[in-house]
Amino acid sequence: MSNFKTFVTVHQYQLASIPEELWEPLYTKLENDYLDAGNFVELHLGDVVSGYSVHTKKDISMEKHSNIFLVDHAWTTTPEEAKQQLKNNMKLLDRLEGIMNIENEEEEEEEEDMDTETTDEVVKMVAEQANVSYQEAKVALEAENYEVVNAIMRLTMDEEHKKEADRLHEQVVNQILASGRVEEKEQEERIAAEEKKKKKEQETLKKRVERIYTEMWSFLQTYSFSVLQQDGQPKSQTAWYICDEVGSALCHSSSPNINCVPFVYSRSGKDIVPYSVFFPVKNIGPREAFTCNLLPTDLTRSIDQKAYLVAFENRILESEVTETTRTELIQAYKDYKKELSSVEPPKSNKITDAQKATEALKETTSHASSETVYVSTTTPFVRDSLKLPNCKFVEEKAKADIIWYSHDYTQWESLKSSQTVNQFPNESCLTFKHNLSNLVQKTYGLPVWIPQTYNLVSQLGEVVGNYLDNEEQGKDNLWILKPWNLARGLDISISRSLPEIIRQHVSNVPKIAQEYLTKPCLYNGKKFDLRYIVLLRRTDPTMIACVYNMFWIRLANKRFNLEDLDDYERQFTVMNYSQYEMTQLDYKSFIYHMEKQHKVEWKNVQKDINQAMKDVLAAAAIQLQPLGLASDTSSTHDAFSIYGFDIMLTEDYKPQVIEVNFSPDCTRACKYDPEFVNNIFSLADGRLGNVEKGLESFTVL
């Protein structure tokens, strides 16, 4: 097989988007790393866009599919590593500033001289105190380095004392010179000057890095690839890259004249070299600007397409992002908000008060408490901590009365009527962040106990409209970006940059954008969140849910502010899965100090928290799948589930439901309370005959 045929076989999926007549010239250029676009095109600054654009040369024209060009990748990065890479590579920093047309303005040295007006006042004051002329006072101040007291003494001292003072001063100076202290002082001054210069350079570097990080979202492109994990399964990853000077100057148009696509070249099956390639899809005349389509193909709603292009407004040839577009986006957000504001929570007999739920729970108690209950589990903390006398572990699920799984349970049809499992079908309606937001909004509209949240896959128009409306209203635009279904603080970032928010749409991990809580309640000046373990005992015929009385406090390590958004220990509270030190707080001690610091009665705060958690679970119990947990068909088995609710408080002590976690790791809970698992099981299955005892550790919602 020829080298070209091998090339086609290896790259057949990538070649599918390229005209076949261009495959061979592409192969030749790739094999020789031949970047010849400069022979045909030139860069213009401020011509059809404010930055750079690519144009054919004055004596060059191109026909459709007549040529294909390679584009180098100037930088491949990840959003998490980008800032550090920029700090460590000054050449890259300089090059990217050139590509993005960022002027590197050197900061002027700070003025250290005393303000003229202030100096004049001081001279007048010294002249008055010493009863001398303005000029004499000024000379004395200059001689004494503007030490006011020394200047006045110099002016009021008689001649004999002045001569003696000058003699002593000269003697001291000579002694200092002899001792070498002058050199010491000069060395200290040099060190101080160097430290000041270094600090200024670091501040300048930080500003340059931040500017590039903000601007890069208008230039970054992506391609996906798979990496084999240790278990042999492929995992999809996304590479973020910025093209070279030519590729980054390609403008957007809804009617493009070129197509530009990433192309990962496997040279002789050994080296993997990423490029982008572009080729004309229309005839292009002399000095005509090259345009491509920057829109992802999955965006089908017109409002989402317009929202996405806001990230590229400085690269759009036809000014497709205009004030009209801005108005449309804000109106789309307002229409969405109006729709949510009109939602009326459904009424359901499933939701009862705490007293009726408690009575229903007690009715499940079996009098045959000596009956052996068989438990099958894959969860270590359950196996280690379940000590109820009538419980016995079995390996086979078919022989178990209670099945407790830490991962998704899927074998619903195999369950018997006598069995209980620790999951409900479709729990992702609660535990996936975008689903939780959708469930709450469809049920309650805009409740005050959950931050405004958008699905960046399907609600791009609404979130951009919200951002722009905040901008017009002068509100803070701070958003936290989170994956749909990752816990432990993974892949989370905080951003004020609208292009960064928009470009998360093409991340390989689907994300939400959620308004950042800028005025949280603080504990000793630090952010915190509260982890509650909530047992959902059943959803039919009435919902029974209980919250464990003991809760866990997760505390940031540094005092909160809104300046250091990249400082994990200042902005985030999940330390137990990171390399940072974790602060342990007992919940009773926390309550005591909160009441003391904030002059608030915790029982009232807790009441609001409990109501918010109950409202979330009530929405799930009422709404049919896939929106909620409810089903049209009756279940053939029994079920319960525990969830980890993460709650924050606003500065006026109102709860914010941040997320609901599936199958929370309760190893730490078992260390704090050895009876934790026993209490869960006592309420989860009435056959254990311990409901009354279990209720002592819970509050029924």
Image: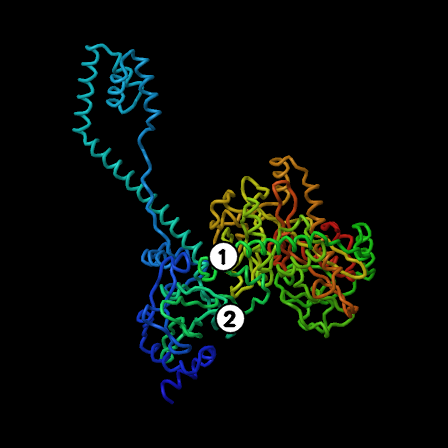
* Mark 1 in CB contact with mark 2 (< 8 angstroms): no
Seen from the viewer's position, the closer of residues 289 and 623 is: 289
Which tag is nearer the camera, tag 1 or tag 2?
A: 1
Q: Is label 1 in a helix, a strand or a loop?
A: helix
Residue 235: image tag: 2
Residue at screen point 46% across, 61% down:
316
Outermost bottom residue? 1
Task: Tell me if I can see residue 461 in this picture.
Answer: yes
Seen from the viewer's position, the closer of residues 234 and 396 is: 234
First in residue order: circle 1 vs circle 2: 2
Q: Is label 2 in a helix, a strand or a loop?
A: strand
Quadrant where the N terminus sits is bottom left
Residue at screen point 31% across, 39% down:
109
Residue 283: x %, y % from top left: 42, 74
Residue 500: image tag: 1
Instruction: Bin the neighbour count of mark 2 within 10 Å (Cα to Cα): few under 14, some 14-19, many 20 and up.
Output: few
